[in-house]
Image: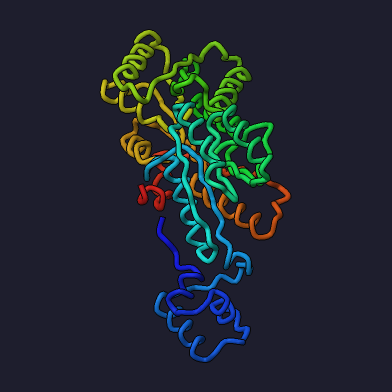
Amino acid sequence: MARQIKIKDIAKMAGVSSGTVDRVLHNRGGVSESSKKAVERILAEVGYRYNIHTSAVSLTKEFNLVITTPGGIPGEYWGSVMSGIEHALNEFYDINIHCIQALYNQFDVYSCRTAFDSVLQMSPDAVIIGPTFASETIRLCNELDKAEIPYVFVDSVIDGTSPVASYTTDQYACGHLLGKLLSSFTPSDAKFAICGTARVGDERSNNTQERKKGFLAYFKETGRSDSVSEIRFSISNPKETEEIILELVKNNPDIKGIAVLNSRGYVVADILRRHGIDDIRLMSFDLTSNNIRCIQNESIAAVLCQRPELQGFFSVKSLIHWLLYRNADANKHHKMPIDVVFKENLPFYKEIVDSE
């Protein structure tokens, strides 16, 4: 993350105290003309912008913000969450925030446990949590509650916890909508498959479980419960994954729709396309760079997008508000809009597409 110029940096460069810089910024007086000119010169040189929303305590105190989410690179879902976090930190550049990351492998519960165990050792003032694994998240939140450390959830909400705020999508509604969409794009007698990813420790993702419930509920409501099969594949074993997908298609020729319940839709899409299987509609989640590629070549029919950048941005904003003013939103659980993106409307997400 790019380092922002802070009050203490201005003070050091001008050869004055942080209090002097604060008085110049607020035009309070009590500063010698030479000191005032020195501060103003540095402010002009560095292009410093004063944020009127910062309080006196924010100018002097450094806050430790720990981010413990799945790791992600640009173009992937969690990379987009991190991008939103970075944008928020840039916007609130005037607040002394020391950002510490404790990232983990979202497909490995033991990696998550190690990351969560390290959080309290980092002396956090606040924590952003990506709660992929329910039991590990509850354990961490219990410790944070005891220490009276505020935390915010992104991507998912875990029952039995007390976050200051959460920014997520209604995952049950996502699954239900995905079932309805996939059904509407396939023959009335079609069969379907839902795909999830295997995880080390065999603990399923909280989001995947809710999406699965919603998806199956749709087919139960329409009297087609027996039309859905379920498989799981491994991200770490491409050869085995290909065998699983091809066996599924070979043994179930009536399957005309596949729903991948996470952002790895491109994994299945690439396998089907590589083997010339083009009579199956596939839908997935998230506008990742690989999913965008598959939407463009029509191996993925559509994805549901859940605004990960906004989730990251608002998570930081909520915690800063809490740290400065010690109060939270009356409605602390915030649901992101659900965007359905096809090839036809993909260009209207130009900013996301270009960034990938």
Q: Position of residue 47 (x, y in %)?
A: 43, 75
Tell me if residue 55 comes above or below residue 226 in the rendering: below
Picture layout, residue 337 above or below residue 48 = above
The N terminus lies in quadrant? bottom left
Residue at x 56%, y 47% (from the top left corner): 123
Residue 285 coordinates in the image, percent (x, y): 46, 34
Q: Residue furthest right?
A: 330
Where in the figure is residue 338, as x and y percent of width and height?
55, 40
Name the residue located 37 percent from the left edge and 45 percent from the top edge: 74
Residue at 63% x, 20% y is: 221
Q: Nearer the viewer, residue 185 or 317?
A: 317
Viewer can see residue 338 = no
Quick one: which residue is furthest to the top in this view?
251
Which residue occupies 38% across, 21% down? 234
Q: In the figure, 230 relative to 20: above or below?
A: above
Q: Is residue 97 left or right of residue 270?
A: right
* Viewer-proximal residue among 16 and 37: 16
Residue 349 visible in the shown view:
yes
When asked about the image quadrant of residue 274, the answer is: top left
Considering only vertical position in the picture, is 252 above or below 280?
A: above
| Image x and y of residue 201, in percent | 48, 20
175 to the left or right of 272: right
Q: Report whether 277 appears left or right of 3.
A: left
Count of labels in the image: 0
How is colour applied across the structure in the image? Answer: rainbow
